[in-house]
Image (cartoon, rainbow, N blue to C red):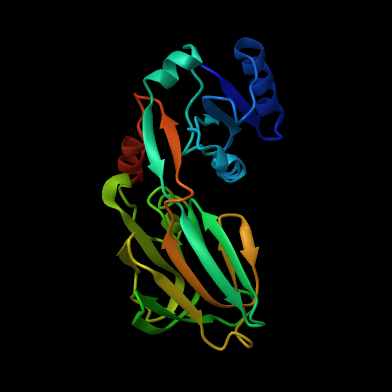
Amino acid sequence: MKFFFYSSNSNEAIAAKEKFIKEYRQHSAENADVIVPIGGDGFLLKSLHDFKQFKKPFYGINYGSIGFLMNTESDEKLDKIISSAQQIELKPLKMKAKNNKGETFESIAFNEVSIMRQTHQASKISIKINDIERMSELICDGVLVSTAAGSTAYNLSAHGSIIPLDSKLLALTPISAFRPRRWKGALISEKMKINLYVNNSTTRSSSVTADHNQFRDIEEVEITSSKDSMCYLLFNNNHSMEERILKEQFTQ
C-alpha cells in the first residue's frame, strides 16, 4: 500500500511524518493509495481542499487539540489498520456568493458555510429554500449551513442539531438570533437549494466563509450539495464516525 504523508507545522506532527516516511516510504499524492494528514481537524480540512482532485481516501492521524475527524495513532501496522477501516463519504457544500459590487465568488466547504456580521450592527437575512421564501427577516449575528460531518463543529457550538452521516440532511442554524428569538434553525434535505440574502447589505455589511475561504460585503449566497468534489474519510474500525457522533450527543 502506498502512502502520502502530509503534516501540520507542529514539531510533533513533523516528527511523526518523518517516522512514518522512514517506515513506509513517501509517495506523491497522485500516486498514493491513501493520503495521510497528520495534525488536527483544521489541518484535515486543509488537506481535503489541497488534494481532493486526486480522488484518494484520507486517513487522518491526530496530532492536534481535538481530532474529532482524526484517528488515534496505533502500534499496529498502518496498512493493516487501513485495510479494515470504515470508509465515510463526504459530500461538500458548493457556495456561490455575490457582493454588493456585483462581483461573484465560488468555493466549497466540507464543514460549513457561514454568514457573519462585519460591524456592530446585526445582520438582517432572508431565507429561501428551493426559491420559496421561508423567512423574510432573521436578525442575528449570522447564520450557517452545515454538512453532517461538520454538524459537530461550529454548528454544535451555535446550538445546532447534530446530524447522522447517513441522513442526507443539512443543518441551517442561526448564530445569536435576536428576532425571531426562539427560532433554533431547520434541517434541510441535501437535495434542496438554499439562498441567503443580506438585507441592507451596504449598511449592515456581512461576510461569508466556506470552511477557511472568506469573502466580505456579501449581498447573497447560494448553497447546494456538490457531488463533483466528493471525498472519502477512513476511520479505525473500533472507533467509527457514527459512534463518535452518537457519543458527542451524550457528552455533558
> Is residue 189 placed above or below 181 in the rendered structure?
above
Q: Nearer the viewer, residue 71 or 184?
A: 71
| Residue 206: quarter of image | bottom right
Give x and y (percent) for residue 213: 62, 58
Compared across the picture, whether 63 is left or right of 89 comes to right
Residue 142 visible in rendering:
no
- Count of labels shown? 0
Give x and y (percent) for residue 14: 70, 26
Q: Which residue occupies 44% across, 21% down?
A: 82
> Is residue 63 placed above or below 171 in the rendered structure?
above
> Is residue 6 placed above or below 131 in the rendered structure?
above
Q: Nearer the viewer, residue 134 or 159?
A: 134
Compared across the picture, whether 160 is left or right of 50 comes to left
Give x and y (percent) for residue 99: 62, 77
Residue 58 visible in rendering:
yes
Give x and y (percent) for residue 28: 64, 26
Q: Which residue occupies 51% across, 16% down?
A: 1
Q: Which residue occupies 61% across, 30% down?
A: 29
> Is residue 114 placed above or below 2 in the rendered structure?
below
| Residue 189: quarter of image | bottom left
Compared across the picture, whether 190 is left or right of 220 comes to left
Residue at the limit of the structure toward the left, as seen here: 167
Q: Nearer the viewer, residue 173 or 149?
A: 149
Q: Which residue occupies 38% across, 37% down?
A: 88
